[in-house]
């Protein structure tokens, strides 16, 4: 007789989104409308509007934000950065990193609860729609228990999909620009399969995130959430339960008489939590500081005639009965480090040369050998003109070679604040190449303020064993 192993069960819940047998525990939080909810909702809709509007906004003739990956150009507020500007990128990322450290040390996970797109769209777009279509948390639970796909759930998924398509298009507009996006959506997919597949993949990822993965993004996938244990300290702002005041908790009635704490154990703070935790267990990594439990508990406290704020913005030190203190060494060192990083960033930004040159290989044969023995080697030169007016660039061979460089349009014009590239041809005698290579030096100059010397190793013919070339 076959022996079936008993299913393994955890002794307790290990993750708020899992049951003890390891199956998914779907969270259907009850919304708690209160003063914090109202404030977050206003901010959420402002952020959504800003996100949708930015791709359409131009500044100094450029998109306000364009992270053009195919062309490897990153435009922020009228300034274009190229991947070769490594120092600026390093200082920029360093500044962002220190800012995150500083804000988290001071204000805890305020970003997660108030500004993160995952929270904003989940709590103020997708979940409200779910509650509207499925009939609130109770309706969703009923559909869960029935199993299968109820028509209301199908309708919800259909609307989620439309929203995901819209969000994916907006998101990708940050990477390709609104003009390219319009071009894609007005033409059939077979004219641009790659773009279509990128769009479809992004849509699917957004749909799965909000329809299925949901709060697990914050609990298991988000690296920022994982870092909380090192970023927070006892004086950081947190959403905390005042156990001194609330305990021993008691469900009204007899125990109240025996000096019970203010917590009436109604579990409203647990039922409203979008990550499924009980804030009364103390500060937990799953807490995204969304303030829903604060609103839920304030409503209960108002009903039972107790002061509000049993769950409130506080700090671990303050909740332990100590005075609230903001300053400590790390919140003084972070601004110092931030000032240095931002200062260096600004100095380097202001002292950038007026053009950036990138030399690229061309696709195809690296050289051609002419009948007169001349080797013609094409290379692509990309010029980013940061000046506020059109510039014409001359490309001149400076190495002592018996050759020349041919530029199809000479001097090569690049409009103000634009990037353009041209293929140039180095014509050198075959004898200039040693072991199939020749390093040439040349300059790119606008004839006035900008001159840059460059070196490039050309590929050419190797001498053949018989003294010829191959
Ligand atoms: S414990 Fe409170 S603040 Fe934290 S995630 Fe849950 S509801 Fe939001
Ligand atoms: S909402 Fe307030 S009173 Fe109710 S269980 Fe939570 S902490 Fe206690």
Image (cartoon, rainbow, N blue to C red):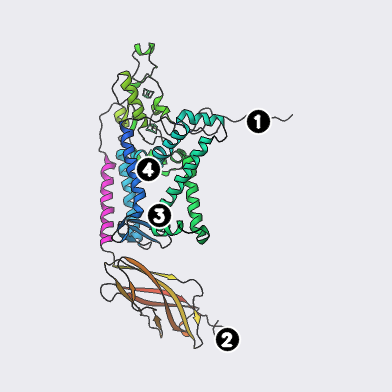
Front: mark 3 or 1? 3
How crowded pointer 4 is (Cα within 10 Å; few <14, some 14-19, many 20+) is rated as some
> Which numbered dot is residue 466?
2
Tell me which label, 4 or 2, sits earlier in the chain: 4
Task: Quickly name the residue at label 4.
Answer: 116
Q: Position of residue 254 (x, y in %)?
A: 38, 11
Task: Quickly name the residue at label 1.
Answer: 5
Residue 290 in view, yes or no = yes
Residue 237 in view, yes or no = no
Mark 2 falls on what kind of element? loop
Task: Quickly name the residue at label 3.
Answer: 173
The quadrant in which the C terminus is found is bottom right
Mark 4 vs mark 2, CA separation in Å = 69 Å
Q: Which residues are magenta?
A: 325-351
Task: Look at the image and say whether residue 239 sits in the magenta stretch.
Answer: no
How crowded pointer 2 is (Cα within 10 Å; few <14, some 14-19, many 20+) is rated as few
Mark 3 vs mark 2, CA separation in Å = 58 Å
Q: Position of residue 432 (x, y in %)?
A: 45, 83
Tell me which label, 1 or 4, sits earlier in the chain: 1
The quarter of the image that holds ligand 2 is top left
């Amino acid at each position: 007789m076959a022996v079936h192993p008993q299913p393994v069960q955890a002794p307790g819940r290990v993750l708020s989104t899992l049951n003890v047998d390891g199956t998914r525990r779907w969270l259907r939080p009850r919304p708690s409308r209160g003063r914090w909810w109202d404030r977050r909702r206003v901010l959420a809709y402002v952020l959504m509007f800003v996100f949708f509007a930015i791709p359409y906004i131009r500044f100094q003739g450029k998109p306000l934000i364009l992270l053009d990956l195919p062309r490897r150009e990153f435009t922020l507020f009228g300034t274009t950065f190229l991947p070769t500007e490594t120092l600026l990128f390093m200082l920029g990322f360093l500044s962002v990193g220190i800012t995150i450290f500083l804000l988290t040390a001071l204000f805890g996970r305020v970003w997660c609860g108030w500004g993160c797109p995952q929270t904003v769209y989940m709590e103020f777009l997708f979940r409200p729609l779910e509650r509207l279509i499925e009939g609130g948390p109770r309706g969703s639970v009923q559909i869960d228990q029935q199993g299968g796909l109820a028509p209301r759930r199908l309708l919800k998924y259909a609307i989620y999909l439309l929203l995901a398509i819209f969000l994916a298009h907006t998101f990708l507009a940050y990477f390709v620009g609104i003009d390219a996006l319009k071009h894609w959506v007005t033409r059939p997919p077979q004219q641009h399969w790659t773009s279509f597949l990128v769009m479809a993949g992004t849509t699917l990822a957004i749909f799965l995130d909000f329809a299925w993965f949901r709060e697990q993004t914050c609990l298991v996938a988000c690296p920022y959430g994982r870092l909380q244990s090192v970023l927070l300290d006892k004086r950081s702002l947190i959403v905390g339960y005042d156990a001194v005041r609330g305990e021993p908790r008691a469900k009204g009635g007899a125990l109240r008489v025996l000096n019970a704490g203010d917590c009436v154990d109604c579990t409203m703070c647990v039922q409203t939590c979008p990550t499924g935790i009980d804030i009364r267990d103390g500060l937990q990594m799953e807490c995204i500081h969304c303030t829903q439990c604060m609103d839920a508990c304030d409503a209960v406290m108002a009903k039972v005639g107790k002061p509000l704020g049993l769950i409130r913005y506080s700090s671990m030190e303050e909740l332990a009965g100590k005075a609230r203190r903001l300053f400590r060494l790390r919140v003084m060192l972070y601004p110092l480090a931030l000032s240095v990083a931002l200062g260096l960033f600004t100095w380097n930004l202001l002292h950038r040369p007026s053009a950036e040159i990138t030399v690229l290989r061309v696709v195809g044969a690296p050289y051609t050998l002419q009948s007169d023995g001349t080797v013609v080697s094409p290379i692509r030169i990309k010029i980013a003109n940061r000046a506020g007016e059109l510039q014409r660039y001359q490309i001149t061979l400076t190495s002592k070679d018996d050759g020349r460089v041919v530029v199809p349009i000479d001097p090569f014009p690049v409009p103000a604040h634009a990037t353009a590239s041209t293929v140039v041809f180095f014509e050198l005698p075959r004898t200039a190449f040693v072991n199939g290579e020749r390093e040439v030096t040349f300059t790119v100059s606008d004839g006035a303020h900008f001159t840059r010397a460059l070196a490039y190793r050309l590929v050419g013919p190797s001498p053949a064993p018989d003294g010829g070339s191959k």
